[in-house]
Image: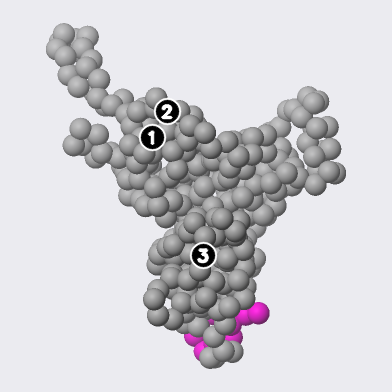
Amino acid sequence: MEAKTKEATALESSDDIALAERLKAGHEQVKSEIHKLIVGQEEVIDLVLLSVFVGGNSLIVGVPGLAKTLLIHTIAQVLDLKFSRIQFTPDLMPSDITGTDLVQEDPKTGRRKMVFMPGPIFANIVLADEINRTPPKTQSALLEAMQEHQVTVQGETYVLKEPFFVFATQNPIELEGTYPLPEAQLDRFMFDIRMDHLPKDQELEVVRSTTGIQDYEFQHVVTGEDIVAFQRLVRKVPVSKVVMEYALNLVRTSRPSPNGSLDFIKEWVAYGASVRAAQYMVLGGKARALMEGRYHVSFDDIRVLAHPVLRHRILTNFHAESERITTDQLIDQLLGAVPMPSSGM
């Protein structure tokens, strides 16, 4: 169901419309290139590309062997962007991520000076592999980079080259020796993307393709400059007031309060989502609309993105855990309980 309002439902200029058509075509071409190597996972790929077109960072959760790392590396190859993989371990230090100052001797003068050696964070697409296996102090080294697209070392600030994204992976079944991400860091991830096993026919295709000779050449149909332009365009997509209010109503209703909360929220939720969730639903809705060739955001865009945006922002309480109530189940109930505004439809 789409919102039909009196507000503008088109981009302002012919240049913007041409760029929107380029984004739609580029999305289809990029997916086609990715599928040269990655079998299935349509929804996962779409959510990752939404993150790219918005300029957000996302968390990818799945058991080992689902090609989480391969997917992100493949996307970096298809987009011809610099890729960096950081394996998070208990002994990883913040400087191992950001880089550090080292003493070097000038061969001409013989004088020693401090020279900054950039760490692996200085890339376009950074994969933080098993991010929850390193202590919070090191996890927090990503915070400034994710939020500000810069890092500060020894009082000096270094700007990261655009476009810049962080994709972090987690294994949901092996929790021993892990450090759960603080809520402040979780909130900075646009999506919590769940990756699951493929259907039998697609798994058979994975076995067939990966046990033979693999020699793929990717066409770079979308460049880093295109991505930056797409990110600017996404923010120009108009959103009707009723659609924006619907996203905000979902977020506000997810928060328990002594007065006015829904019964299931009071019973099972410790903390609800922040306003950042509404921002990401609207931004993701704008990018999704452009990917589908539309110039306005619909209610359906918000509903489709509710699960990946909210599932890591709604914190369940002990009562929910004891009854094995999942966040996804709560979001299903939330979508059923919060009415879509009728004004202007």
**Residue carrying label 2:** 90
Circles 1 and 2 in contact, beta carbons < 8 Å:
yes
The Cα–Cα distance between marks 1 and 2, rounded to whole angstroms, is 6 Å
Residue 227 x, y percent position in the rendering: 50, 51
The Cα–Cα distance between marks 1 and 3, rounded to whole angstroms, is 28 Å
**Residue carrying label 3:** 268
Amino acid bearing label 3: Trp
Q: Which one is closest to the eye, mark 1 or mark 3? A: 3
Residue 215 makes an appearance in the image: yes
Circles 2 and 3 in contact, beta carbons < 8 Å:
no
Residue 193 x, y percent position in the rendering: 58, 51
Q: Is residue 196 magenta?
A: no
The Cα–Cα distance between marks 2 and 3, rounded to whole angstroms, is 33 Å
Q: In which quarter of the image is residue 71?
A: top right
Amino acid bearing label 2: Pro
**Residue carrying label 1:** 135
The residue shown at (81%, 43%) is: 202
